[in-house]
Amino acid sequence: MIVNLIQMQSRQKGIVVEIRGGQGMANKLCNMGLRPGKEITKVSSQIWGGPQTIEVDNTQIAIGYGMAQRIFVEVKE
Amino acid sequence: MSEKKILLLGNPNVGKSTIFFRLTGAKVIVSNYPGTTVEFTQGYMKVGQGKDVVIDAPGTYSLDPTCKSEEVALHMLAESDLVINIIDATNLERNLYLTLQLLEKGMPVVVVLNMRDEAKHRGIYIDVKKLEEQLGVPVISTCGLTGEGIKELIECIPQAKAVKVSFSNDSERWKKIGNIVEGVQNLSHHHHTLLERLEDLSIRPLTGIPIALGVVYCCFWIVRFLGENIIGYIFEPLFTKLWLPLMLKINALMREGSFLSRILIGNLIEGEINFGQSFGLLTTGLYVPIAMVLPYIFSFYLILGFLEDFGYLPRLAVLLDNVMHHFGLHGYAIIPFILGLGCNVPGALAIRLLEGRREKFIAATLMAVAIPCMAQIAMIIGILGSYGGKYVVIVFSTLFVLLVIKGVVLNKVLKGMSPEILIEIPPYRIPQFTAVVKKLWMRVLSFLKEALPFVLLGILLVNILYSLKIVDFIASAFTPALTELWGLPKEAIPVLIVGFLRKDVAVGMLAPLDLTVKQLVIGSTILAIYFPCVATFSVLVRELGLKDMLKSALIMLTIALAVGCFLNLIL
């Protein structure tokens, strides 16, 4: 099943399949280790449309709500 | 042999600074990169007979810059002779990307594999010998925390070499990195450590928000506790027991009321020297910055340095991101605000972390108006505290309400969107004692270097203004407005003038004026709002441009005028 970052549950794992957004956003995320094909774990999400925290390769990254909506992840049912 | 320039380069949060402080001696300089407001640290390292310059570059993910500080890192690279590339053993893949780019540039490189012990805790084992073979340059494994491997690193620096590699595109790079990682890294299962559980708790909203409130409360409590005790047990006795007798002797040598005695010792209050109110260069000029302000600066930066090195601040930024969006900012803007509480100048410098012009404008205007610096806070507490905590609370809650109102209004009025947060959250790390102490020492020293001359200049200026009767002239022009609107006497004019130079001195000048509590509250609130001090102003002009800064200043003056009237009416 493919969901975006916001729809992921805390502690759920998944593989990044697509990042919808400009080249700038994709580059920044890639620099921080987040690119299609990587396995990530959702850590937490802040209330009321706050940032989402994920873990990729032992590094935690906080991503703003709007950006998180555009990152799609394949998760197990 | 001329000195070599050695650049420490690596991703953010890989422990660069810790290695830097281990490599360099006591003489460390923080400066701005020419033409920018990006700060970097520079020190010296002994190598054989001579010494080399070591530069701690801003953290960067790649050599294709995505922001100002990464551009600076790139410029620095072009000017250096050798690179120490620090990589984080817990995230080899991402870190090697920069390493490959460095090798492609043909720079002489030594790779430092840092955080080895942390990687071990996480069940990651890296074969250093194999990594060295794969990269073709020396690889040293270190632990910045314990200092393990630093000696080997220093010995290894002369063996840095350049290897020529080239890739035609990114996917080739990532493939090469994938191969390297597979060959050198071994993963095993690991158990969660206590710090990792704490990381989890402090980033989930349900537990994170109470933790944040607790942390902020504790920090302020500790700063106050340390500050008060340092004053009470060290500086107060020092000044009254040692400095005062000396001042009395000097005073006896001079004719009472002469120009020189007024400048050096100041006015005698009820026949005695009063360190807070006499306003001489040697009395108030030294007492205010050293005995009243320095203890709080010291305690604030001690706690801040600890929080920074522990890795708490990015978590606070994430938790507050929501709230900050209502002000048109994202969570990271909390960093300039927190730094601004220490001194507005580093706060203003940290505004460069924000990207857009709109964000910078909002953050600068909010900080300059509503965030008083530690020096000012110390003086406000000192002067109003004796009338009861209530009045101190009035001043600070007025500032806080202003912050909220102004943030919301600016966000509504200014066109544009608030940008989104995207930050790396470093793991919690137990701060290394020497790094915290060195950073504290640097910050305290820079406070003394910057503040002391301004305080003395301010006091000198006041004395000259009084002697030449200039104050009377300006006062008679502005008095009607001042008394009608704000209810302040004409003696408050020089206070406002000095406030441009140093806010702490200005607040101190309210003391001998014989004001009512209400006037003191109004005076200290207006001093906080009406304009940034000259040091902050000059940084903000550079940061925002003159045009935006003038707009911002206009907003500040208007608000000061309004708030002064308002407080005068309701108190």
Image (tube, coloured by chain):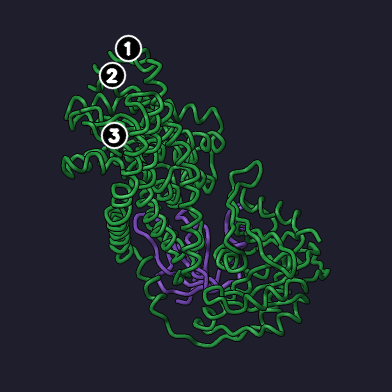
Chain colours: A purple, B green
Image coords of residue B71 (percent x, y) = 67, 50
Question: Hey, what amino acid is under mark 3?
Answer: Gln
The chain letter for the residue carrying disc 3 is B
Labels 2 and 3: the sequence-earlier one: 3
User: Disc 1 marks which residue?
Assistant: B476
Relative image position of residue B549 (x, y in whole percent): 50, 30
Q: Chain of mark 2?
A: B
Q: CA distance from mark 2 to mark 3?
A: 18 Å
Q: Which mark is residue B277?
A: 3
Question: Going from the N terminus, do you reach mark 2 or mark 1 first?
Answer: 1
Q: Say which residue appears at 69% left-offset and 55% top-offset.
A: B64
The correct choice, above or below, for B467 with respect to B495 in the image is: above
Name the residue type under label 1. Ser
Seen from this angle, which residue lies furthest right? B164
Image quadrant in which the C terminus of chain A is located: bottom left
Image location of residue B215, percent across then percent down = 32, 61
**Number of numbered discs overlaid on the protein picture:** 3
The residue to which callout 2 is attached is: B490
SS state under label 2: loop
Q: Of helix, strand and loop, which one carries label 1?
A: helix
Mark 2–mark 1 CB contact (< 8 Å): yes
From the viewer's perspective, is residue B240 above or below residue B137?
above
Above or below, B183 relative to B526: below
Residue at point 57% right, 57% down? A20
Depth-wise, is mark 2 or mark 3 nearer the camera?
A: 3
Residue shown at 42% from the left, 42% from the top: B328
Residue depicted at x 61% and y 51%: B69
The answer to whether residue B71 is left or right of residue B344 is right
* Front of the two marks 1 and 3: 3
Q: What chain does mark 1 sit on?
A: B
